[in-house]
Amino acid sequence: MTPSEKIVNIEEKLNNWLREALVRAFPESTADADTIAVTPATDEQFGDYQCNAAMGLARVLKTNPRQIATQWVDAVEPADWVEQIDVAGPGFINIRVAAAALADGLMAMDEDARLCTPETGRDRTVILDYSSPNVAKPMHIGHIRSTVIGCALDRLHRFLGFRVIADNHLGDWGTQFGLLIMGYRHFLDETRLREQPVEELERLYVKSYERSREDPDWLDAARRELVKLQQGDADNRALWQSFVDLSMREFNRIYDRLGVSFDVVRGESYYRDQLAAVVQLLQAQGLAEESEGAQVVRLDDEGIPLCIVQKSDGGFNYATSDLATIKQRMEEFDTEQIIYVTDERQQLHFKQCFAIARKLGWTAQLVHVWFGLMRLPEGTFSTREGNVIKLERLLDEAEERALRLVQASSPEMDAADQRAVARAVGIGAIKYADLSQNPQSMITFTWDKALAMDGNSAPYLQYACARIASVQDKYQARYSGQDCRAYPIELTEVVERRLALRLLRFPSAVNRATALLRPSVLADYLYELAQTYSSFYQNVPFLKAPEGVRESRIRLCGLVARVLRQGLDLLGIETPGRI
Ligand code: ARG
């Protein structure tokens, strides 16, 4: 048995215990595990956990909730690890766990590399489609959310044992390349291409596009170039490849800075030869029909607009490409789920694709995680061109600001170390500002909030870890050779108990963040843990406490640091040893 299996995940243990009692008291109830799951008590006076399931069961069992709760509680197996269980109000069940059981749970966590988080995703495959920028366009701040949220979801799933395929689905195919090739052949500025290749490609495209609006011959020529590219013309293919390579070089630079990597980088172009077959399949199944020369799939039954899968000129659409992609992914990776992370503007697109996939009988679970766009208060960023804030400049600015912070807090640190710490703090701040929000709310980014040392920010959490490290160092210096783990964890003070309950909630925070596809659930948990730690730290003595109590507290500190580090790591955020 591995330690994770042995444990003592308190919430799980409570849930099982309550379920058994419910079955005994009401064999006819068919409540599922989720419905009866305990939640942390809203008021610690009443207990550690509460279960509100009796209210819901009342309808099914046609009995009043208070009576259900009472019979239920009467049916529980006596357990020495539960200090108190009682019924309150209309039928709430309140539970207080014995301090010794909490301490056992913490010691099990302390001995387990995974902090007692079960690998619930073992043998399951999930594909994460995120970042996915477009070739020949600079990545801008809107893309950061997909990359940062996608990366956190990726790490969370991997930690839970899922087999994750991270796929960067580049926008590297489509009608824009005809115009871009024309722009490149006629307006290229070699110097600019060398200095700022992707910006230059974008300029060329825009120029060519503008020209096409007033010059039909230009548009025709662009169409011809596109057809040549699609038919495999060597010159156009080489040019296209160079656009992809130049863009990838820039994207990779950003991925390096963000610490993001992919298992598969397949652009839309990868599926280009599979598009006709998708349309044929849809026709064969009676799902696609002709309308004004185009092939469309009607989705009236889903209450959404029809989807054009082939245009009247024979060209295929974004949706066709995504359908081919789903088919390929299901066949190649035998995946259970595909998760897409993009901004809110693609909601209809994915609704249409998912509806068509369902009609085709494709079984993979398809999920769109969308996010609102990030708003920037006027004047926040020093470098701006129109509304497009270049991602690299944003990262530069984050590191510069973090460097000033580190120089102020650790003036004695040598310059290279300061820069390394500033990198972790600056990039962490940007990521956390994004991840700590509900992705679907519109967020306004401010430097003050992102870099706040005393608020819900990455620097605050990173700093908490660093502070704990220095407490541990002091302990080591004073009691060198002493092994805290030789002493048991004991919870005597109220703040210790509070801290214990928070720590023990780590596995469920990770599970919930993953199941809900919301990294903010984990971020909230980490922030609360850091706050609880801070009141613990301020209210009880550590090094001055008597032997045994001292060691127990140092062990608690160590666990807090491990949970914070592990949690931040799952969000893709580094924790420097010192700040
Ligand atoms: N390239 C698209 C964009 O930048 C995002 C692609 C998302 N993934 C997908 N399979 N459609 O908006």
Image (cartoon, rainbow, N blue to C red):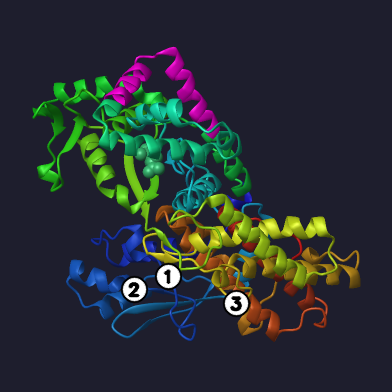
**Residue bearing mark 2:** 52
Does any atom of ligand 1 lie closer than 8 Å to the CB of label 3? Answer: no
Of the residues shown, which amino acid type is indicated by label 2? Asn
Select label 3 or label 1 by which is in front: 3
- Mark 1 and mark 2: span between their CA atoms? 9 Å
Tell whether 159 sits left or right of 225.
Answer: right
Residue located 74% across and 55% down the image: 420
Q: Is residue 373 visible?
A: yes
Q: Nearer the viewer, residue 513 or 445?
A: 445
User: Is 25 in the magenta?
Assistant: no
Return the disc, 1 or 2, that comes first in the chain's sequence. 1
Which residue is nearer to you in this view: 226 or 427? 226
Q: Are marks 1 and 2 in contact (CB under 8 Å)?
A: yes
In the rendered image, residue 538, in percent from the top left (x then y), is placed at 69, 84
- Ligand 1 shows up in the quarter that is top left
Is 35 on the left or on the right of 536, as rendered? left
Res. 169 visible in picture: no
Q: Which mark is residue 39?
A: 1
Question: Residue 486, percent across and down?
Answer: 80, 65
Residue at the spot x=37%, y=34% of the render? 208
- Residue 236, which numbered label? none
Q: CA distance from mark 3 to mark 1?
A: 18 Å
- Where is 66 relative to 206, above or below? below
Q: Name the amino acid, label 3.
A: Thr
Residue where numbered disc 3 is placed = 532
Mark 2 vs mark 3: give the one in front. Answer: 3
As drawn, 42 above or below 275: below
Which secondary structure class fits the magenta region best?
Answer: helix
Please give the range of residues in magenta: 220-246
SS for dot 3: helix
Q: Observer-nearest residue: 335 or 461?
A: 461
Tell me which numbered mark, 3 or 1, is placed earlier along the sequence.
Answer: 1
